[in-house]
Image (tube, helix red, strand yellow):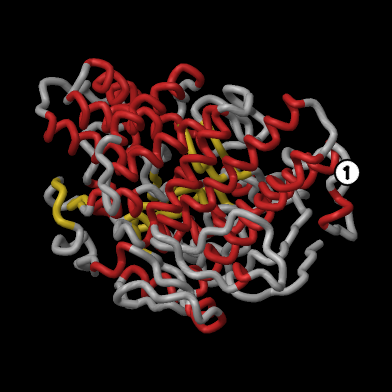
């Protein structure tokens, strides 16, 4: 059920596009209809349900279509280490750096993020007026502060200067057609929101899909690491990134089986810090269909889209003996044919086993695997990288990287210079967090790209990737969606678009 007062400008902000369809892990009571701002926040139960509804905004990152387009794929294709075997013209244009501001993926992320931010702004305004215990109110506000920061963090990295909206907007409000605010001011709000969430009394971990203190600290550590690089270059934030990431490490444990990253039994557990929740019969997704080989009978899916396929060169860039590259670990190149498992389907290339969902592939083809936004190895590698920038390779920094390498059956790192250790950590980020929408953001903050052919890092705008494409400088940011430019005369376009 959606309630739209008016749909203008940024999607927007407006007065609210409220969606009350959700996974049962989010919603504890029946959806309310006939929502009005003045009458909904009357008790703690209503406030809880409203916040549960905000979580459903996370789904747009995995929304896909029959051509294999989805924001989580678009973000990854910008990094240059994936191909698309499906029918999407837009995916091909991104890979070959000839896309433009009318690419629908750009609008999906912009509009979806600002609709979610509109909901968080209303929640932050109304929840303080609701009768409930102080502890419950503070925790609820902590979740909302995290979610607003989460969506703004995606906006500022993808689009640069963006409108900064921190209160509900009415049809007569000047913020209905806002101008763009500087990147630094967006990050100030993100850090302030996450700092407020830190102090809100959230639990250290959460296995129901809601925000935890671990999620807050992991995201804040990522923000500090990002702001230490381009475009702000606030190098003093490396120390803050290390200290914040260190807070996360005692609360989570690495899985001893990579299959647990994408099965149903281990959702929200172990190393999984923050996920988008899916459940058959409530909300499903096309993640496995989008990432299995194109038009090959691998699983019970109606579509096999091949929309995001790792390049063979990237898979070959892992060290010899790396467990992650062995069959059915992070990748796979063959699988029993659906309907006749006595036959084996040979792909002719690698596909992402990291997102293969055995339950749906061997069942009815309906996927409810969770999408992971944050997990422990990212916090470990943030800690190691940021610590190295401040103090060089410390024993503690080595320890965190080597935990990840030991699981991958690789020898421990030792005896490296600061510069060598920095690149070793960057490679580990590429290899451990592969195809998790981290690589493009690493390119943005470092202005370096991983040259998998030579196993080195080069300048992002002069080093061809394994597909022979050299990144254009304009690709450090996405364009402001053309529909928004056309609607709001106060918006300007990013350079080159």
Q: Position of residue 222 (x, y in %)?
A: 40, 39
Q: Position of residue 15 (x, y in %)?
A: 72, 64
Residue 73 can be seen, yes or no:
yes
Task: Name which residue lies at 31% across and 39% down.
Answer: 429
Task: Name which residue lies at 41% across and 50% down.
Answer: 437
Q: Position of residue 72 (x, y in %)?
A: 48, 56
What crowding class fits label 1: few (fewer than 14 Cα within 10 Å), some (14-19), or many (20 or more)?
A: some
Quadrant housing residue 444: bottom left
Task: Name which residue lies at 35% across and 32% down.
Answer: 241
Q: Position of residue 146 (x, y in %)?
A: 57, 40
Q: Give 201 or 2, whichever is nearer the viewer.
A: 201
Q: Quadrant of the C terminus?
A: bottom left
- Number of numbered labels in the structure image: 1
Which residue does the numbered mark 1 point to in the structure image? Answer: 42
Quadrant housing residue 267: top right
Image side of residue 278 versus residue 10, left or right: right
Residue 87 can be seen, yes or no:
no
Q: Give 221 or 346, whichever is nearer the viewer.
A: 221
């Amino acid at each position: 059920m959606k309630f739209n007062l008016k749909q203008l400008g940024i999607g927007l902000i407006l007065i609210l596009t409220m969606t009350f369809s959700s996974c049962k892990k989010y919603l504890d009571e029946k959806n309310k209809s006939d929502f009005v701002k003045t009458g909904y926040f009357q008790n703690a139960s209503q406030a809880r349900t409203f916040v549960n509804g905000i979580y459903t905004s996370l789904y747009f990152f995995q929304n896909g279509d029959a051509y294999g387009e989805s924001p989580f794929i678009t973000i990854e294709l910008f990094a240059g280490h994936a191909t698309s075997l499906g029918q999407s013209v837009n995916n091909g244009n991104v890979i070959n750096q000839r896309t433009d501001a009318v690419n629908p993926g750009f609008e999906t992320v912009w509009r979806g993020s600002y609709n979610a931010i509109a909901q968080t702004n209303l929640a932050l305004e109304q929840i303080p007026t609701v009768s409930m215990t102080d502890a419950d109110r503070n925790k609820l506000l902590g979740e909302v502060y995290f979610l607003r920061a989460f969506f703004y963090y995606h906006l500022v990295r993808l689009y640069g200067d963006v409108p900064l909206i921190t209160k509900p907007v009415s049809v007569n409000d000047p913020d209905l057609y806002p101008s763009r605010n500087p990147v630094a001011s967006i990050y100030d709000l993100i850090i302030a929101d996450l700092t407020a969430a830190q102090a809100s009394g959230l639990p250290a971990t959460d296995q129901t899909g809601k925000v935890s203190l671990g999620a807050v600290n992991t995201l804040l550590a990522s923000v500090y690491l990002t702001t230490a690089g381009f475009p702000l270059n606030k190098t003093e934030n490396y120390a803050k990134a290390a200290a914040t990431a260190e807070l996360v490490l005692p609360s989570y444990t690495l899985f001893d089986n990579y299959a647990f990253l994408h099965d149903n039994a281990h959702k929200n557990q172990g190393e999984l810090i923050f996920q988008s929740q899916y459940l058959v019969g409530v909300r499903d997704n096309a993640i496995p269909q989008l990432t299995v080989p194109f038009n090959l009978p691998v699983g019970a899916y109606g579509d096999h889209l091949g929309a995001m396929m790792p390049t063979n060169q990237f898979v070959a860039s892992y060290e010899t003996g790396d467990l992650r590259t062995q069959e059915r670990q992070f990748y796979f190149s063959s699988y029993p044919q659906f309907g006749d498992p006595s036959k084996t389907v040979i792909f002719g290339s690698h596909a992402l086993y990291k997102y293969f969902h055995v339950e749906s592939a061997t069942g009815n083809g309906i996927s409810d695997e969770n999408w992971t936004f944050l997990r422990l190895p990212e916090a470990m590698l943030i800690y190691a990288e940021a610590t190295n920038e401040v103090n060089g390779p410390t024993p503690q920094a080595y320890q965190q990287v080597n935990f990840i390498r030991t699981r991958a059956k690789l020898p421990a790192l030792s005896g490296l210079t600061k510069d060598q250790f920095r690149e070793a950590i960057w490679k580990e980020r590429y290899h451990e967090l592969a195809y998790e929408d981290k690589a493009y953001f690493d390119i943005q903050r470092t202005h370096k790209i991983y040259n998998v052919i030579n196993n080195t890092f080069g300048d992002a705008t002069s080093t061809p990737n394994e597909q022979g494409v050299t990144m254009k400088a304009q690709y450090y940011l996405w364009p402001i969606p053309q529909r928004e430019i056309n609607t709001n005369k106060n918006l300007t376009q990013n350079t080159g678009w």
